[in-house]
Image: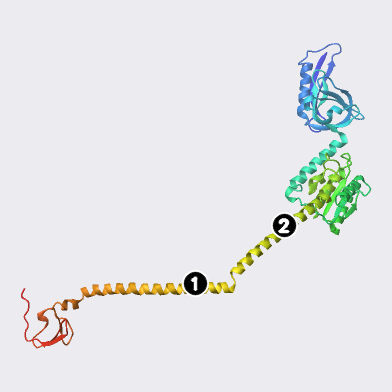
Amino acid sequence: MKLNDQLYAHENFGKSFAALVILASMEDSGQAGAIASAITVSQLNRQVKTLLEQGLARLWIEGEISNLAKPASGHLYFSLKDDSAQIRAAFFRQRQRGPTIGLKNGDQVVAYGRVSLYEARGDYQLIVEQVEPAGEGALKRQFEVLKKMLAAEGLFNEENKRELPTLPERIGVITSPSGAAIRDIISILGRRFPSIPVVVYPASVQGDAAPGELIAALATAVNRDECDVLIMARGGGSLEDLWAFNDEKLARAMAACPIPIVSAVGHEVDFTIADFVADVRAPTPSGAAEIVVPDREQWLRAVNSLAARFGRLGQRAVEDRAQSLDWLSRRLAQASPTAVVERSVSRLANLRQRLNMSARETVSATSHRLELAMRGLHSVSPLATLDRGYAIVEDASSGKVLLNASDATPGDDIRARLAQGELIATVKSTRPKND
């Protein structure tokens, strides 16, 4: 008997799943040939595990939970099944997050993980990393994809948010006219500031038709341009109930709306794409009503306080003006024309007296300085020399002062200036100075 062992891979899960199959055939009935090579069961399971883990990427699997076991270790073991097949699954404690403790048999879930093999028993299984309710999990993934895309486009940027009016003239509400949300909003608005009119733009807030109706109601509000703030609201519900407010077209219409929008969808813990796009997010419809209008009583108190303050300021201003008037009156009495003229005449007489005294003093000082100057000038004047017997001899015709005997020749007419009078003479001879 001859044994042929064959090992081959078969791709059957996407593009990468491989399974090992050992085909054994017996030849020569009753006799076994020599075994060329053999592997152990452990080696086989290890190879199959490696092929499974390397051949398949992590993936999402939807199915119904059955055979759920919760041992003391905290790990969860169960089967995921559909109408015609099942797979074992292990959800280890360190991977468990959120509401996994509430899992039970019969739950329809979506599990994320990797395919592996439990070598000890040779069981093919899914190592679970995340579990979500089947319908809600898919919606959450769609929500996150849309949220990430719109955020990247800038639809959620704070710098694009518009400020709400301090006191709106008219408030628009986009919601179902028969829902609890509109009743809560009208009740709060009536209590806080009943004088502000409210316009309701009806639209479905749940179901397949809801996104289109919400967009149409928003367009009507924009076209009519009668409100200066809008509230888009609906009451609480499941993720599926609120799904209309996660519509991409609605988000873009809200971002393009020129009127400030307050989003009030669901309860405080609920978040929709509309909440991120809106200019302001309110935790509830009632909260939106409190955001868009001030409290009338607070405003009345503030107005009364301002009126009292203005009254005090006015009274103080009147008192200050009266005091200023009294002071100006006293100054006016002191500054009458008669008093001004009298003070001017007295000042003029004083100035005249000071001017006369100053003029006399100036003339006296000037005369004294002139006399001193004349004395000094006379002391160095040539005329003073004449007083001592000297004479100044000049050429009679040219007036040139003669300093040397050689400057004249016999027969020249000369003039000699004396201390008293002059002499006219003719040169008879010259006698130069001997060196």
Classify 285 as above or below 35. below
Q: Is residue 360 left or right of residue 193?
A: left
Q: Position of residue 387 (x, y in %)?
A: 16, 78
Outermost residue on the right side: it is 178
Q: Nearer the viewer, residue 383 or 95?
A: 383
The residue carrying pointer 2 sits among few (fewer than 14), some (14 to 19) or many (20 or more) residues within 10 Å by Cα, namely few
Q: Are marks 2 and 1 in contact (CB under 8 Å)?
A: no
Q: Can residue 360 be seen at all in this image of the molecule?
A: yes
**In this orientation, which residue lies closer to the viewer: 413 or 275?**
413
Three-letter code for the amino acid on which mark 2 is drawn: Leu
Question: Residue 100: which disc?
Answer: none
Q: Residue at x 50, y 73 (%)?
A: 346
Look at 21% across and 76% down and name the residue there. 381
- Amino acid type assigned to the residue bearing label 1 in the image: Arg
Residue named by callout 1: 347
In the rendered image, the residue lying farthest to the top is: 30
Q: Nearer the viewer, residue 143 or 259?
A: 259
Can residue 249 be seen in the rendering of this structure?
Answer: no
Q: Quadrant of the C terminus?
A: bottom left
- Mark 2 lies on a secondary structure that is helix
Q: Which residue is mark 2?
A: 313
Q: Position of residue 336 (x, y in %)?
A: 59, 72
Q: Give the x, y percent position of residue 271.
A: 82, 41
